[in-house]
Amino acid sequence: MTAAAALSGCGDGAKTKKPGGGVPEVGYVVVHPGTVPVIAELSGRTTAYQTSQVRPQVSGIIRRRLFTEGSYVKAGQTLYEIDPSLYRAAGDQARANLASAEASAEAARIKAERYKPLADMQAVSAQDYTDALAQERQARASVAQQRAALATAQINLRFTRVPAPISGRIGRSFFTQGALVTSNQADPLAVIQKLDPIYVDIKQPSTDLLALRRSLAAKGGAMPTTASVRLKLEDGSDYGQTGTVEFTEVTVDEATGTVTLRARFPNPQGLLLPGMFVRAVFAQSIANDVFLVPQQGVARDPRGNATVMLVGPGNKAVTRAVTTSETIGANWVVTAGLKPGDKVITEGIVSAKPGKPVKPVPAGTPQPIKAPKDGAGDARRGG
């Protein structure tokens, strides 16, 4: 439901004046409860949507590097070529071994077929025939083994061309042409990062999150399942693209005492880079049954407590203490102290005296009250 506090009436304007009886004229707005978003502004850092380390799967000397550092690469694109000589030779050897095994298997098959009628005529012993059958099976197994060895050799030969595992922006190469690399080395050849879309990891103190949830529980508010997010860059400018909160971590970082929220943003121009410091602004929750009151209708007593002046019974001015939380546009969010239909005086307050009669008229220029767009507005809960 759109956050609102209905303001009734729009006359020619309430001017502070005392008609015949000396009763001051005041302008008022009628307030009604509604829902408003609780806006949070928290710090965060950008992180790549996907990160992949390019690693060799076979050992050898790098013959060529086939990409430009810092460029965009596509998944499957060849990035490095490792010397294939040894792997090509291993493939030839495996192919020859397979041919030899196939020849042996054929000879064993023919021998077993010849022994069968001889065994039936008892021209050869049953043991000789059994041995011939076993040799045939062993020969077939050897063929399967050599086929697997050939497939492994072909895979290793294919691995001499190192492809990009994902599409994205590739950084500098950590190894140059002529360097020896191994399949189990600790260091990657290069790192690819997908930056469109891009993640923003937002940090919120766990104490703030706990206070927010308690406050919402007391007021009947709710945590939204999704929220749109706006970004402020390091120079204070607005990023211009709207993101979405993907999830909230279920554990608190023991070192920092914060909970991480992750948002995803489109990054078609590549303006956001991993590691940038940003400020995320978003509607973190929804507060129910609150009132929006124009700021000119809220005063502060000497102790700093918020008060409003109402048109009470018999058209007499009444002062009432209220509780405010934050501002949205030109309005205060009042969480306690008001009732539906209360007439809050917003014009002519200086002439109204508590307990004295006033002449109420609808405020001439009521402040439009509407909920801010997600991720925008002046209501803030910093972090």
Image: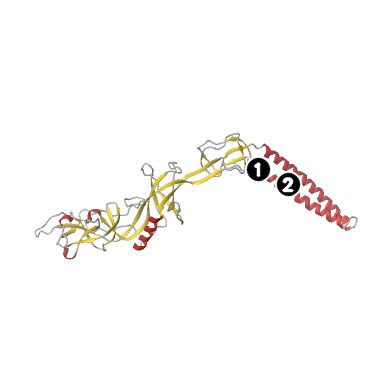
Using the rendered view, name the quadrant where residue 356 is placed: bottom left
The three-letter code of the residue at mark 2 reads: Gln
Give the answer, above or below, for where 370 lies relative to 194: below
**Residue 238 position within the rendered picture, expressed as x and y whole percent measured from the top left:** 36, 44
Question: On screen, 94 above or below 306?
Answer: above
Corner quadrant of residue 19 = bottom left
* Residue 296, numbered label: none
- Relative placement, left or right, of 130 versus 144 is right
Left or right, residue 164 beside residue 357 = right
Q: Position of residue 374 (x, y in %)?
A: 36, 52
Amino acid type indicated by mark 1 = Asn
Q: Residues within 10 Å of mark 2 (few under 14, many from 20)?
A: many
Left or right of residue 172: residue 290: left
First-in-chain label (1 vs 2): 2
Q: Secondary structure at mark 1?
A: helix
Furthest residue to the left? Answer: 20
Per the model, the C-alpha gap separating discs 1 and 2 is: 15 Å
For label 2, the SS is: helix
The answer to whether residue 47 shows anywhere in this view is yes
* Number of residues whose C-alpha sits closer than 10 Å to that of mark 1, classed few (under 14), some (14–19) or many (20 or more): many
Position of residue 225 relative to residue 270, above or below, is below
| Number of the label disc, if any, that sits on residue 146 | 2
Are the residues flagged by discs 1 and 2 in contact, CB closer than 8 Å?
no
Residue denoted by label 1:
156
Foreground residue among 189 and 95: 189
